[in-house]
Image (spheres, rainbow, N blue to C red):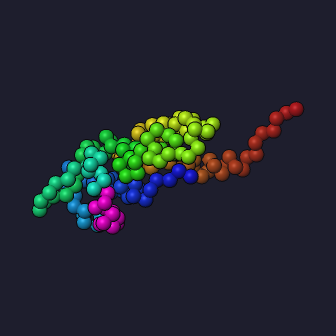
Amino acid sequence: MIRLSKLTDYAIVVLSEMARHAGTVHTVALLADRTGVPAPTVAKLMKAMTPAGLTTSQRGASGGYALSRPADAISIAEIITALDGPIALTACVDGADSQCGVEQLCPMRGGWEKVNRAIRGALEQVTLADMMAPITFPAAPPRSVAAASAATPPARPAY
């Protein structure tokens, strides 16, 4: 199973809260209070997001953090990379931090990079704004239509 780190999940929650109040400077305490993410974790997130160019920081009595650009200009891939490093499924793909011990003998050598590029490309297409949009489901047919369909057996083919 491919799974994001809890820190990345928290980052999306915190950055979404910042996007809801765009143009505002947010303190760590305020973000922690609004999101339920512990303040030390929010502080850790901000320390990673600012060097990655996703947030800006302001010092002083009215200081805090703000998004560096609109939510529709921040990709989920950027957030993942800021916290977890390059998006890499195995040790043998470009950008992976570790090395595979059997890379020279592996018949899949280079093949995983195709999968890695596809996943990275998909994550680059999803923005923070997309994550904030409400999920809509197709409307169910009216009950009377659904009940009538279920009550009527399918027609049998004539042989």
Viewer-nearest residue: 84 or 96: 96
Q: Would residue 7 be found to the left or right of residue 154 on screen?
A: left
Residues rendered magenta in the picture: 35-45
**Residue 87 visible in the shown view:** no
Quadrant position of the C terminus in the picture: top right
**Residue 26 visible in the shown view:** yes
Residue that sits furthest to the left in the current view: 61
Measured as percent of width and height from the top left, residue 150 is found at 70, 49
Measured as percent of width and height from the top left, residue 66 is found at 22, 52
| Residue 143 counted in the magenta span | no
Q: Would residue 53 be found to the left or right of residue 82 on screen?
A: left
Measured as percent of width and height from the top left, residue 98 is found at 47, 48
Residue shown at 58% from the left, 44% from the top: 102
Q: Quadrant of residue 154?
A: top right
Q: Quadrant of residue 40?
A: bottom left
Give the total number of marks visible in the rendering.
Answer: 0
Residue shown at 72% from the left, 50% from the top: 151
In the displayed structure, 102 sits above or below 6; it is above
Residue shown at 61% from the left, 39% from the top: 106
Viewer-nearest residue: 33 or 61: 61
Residue that sits furthest to the top in the current view: 159
Q: Would residue 2 be found to the left or right of residue 152 on screen?
A: left
Measured as percent of width and height from the top left, residue 14 is found at 32, 57
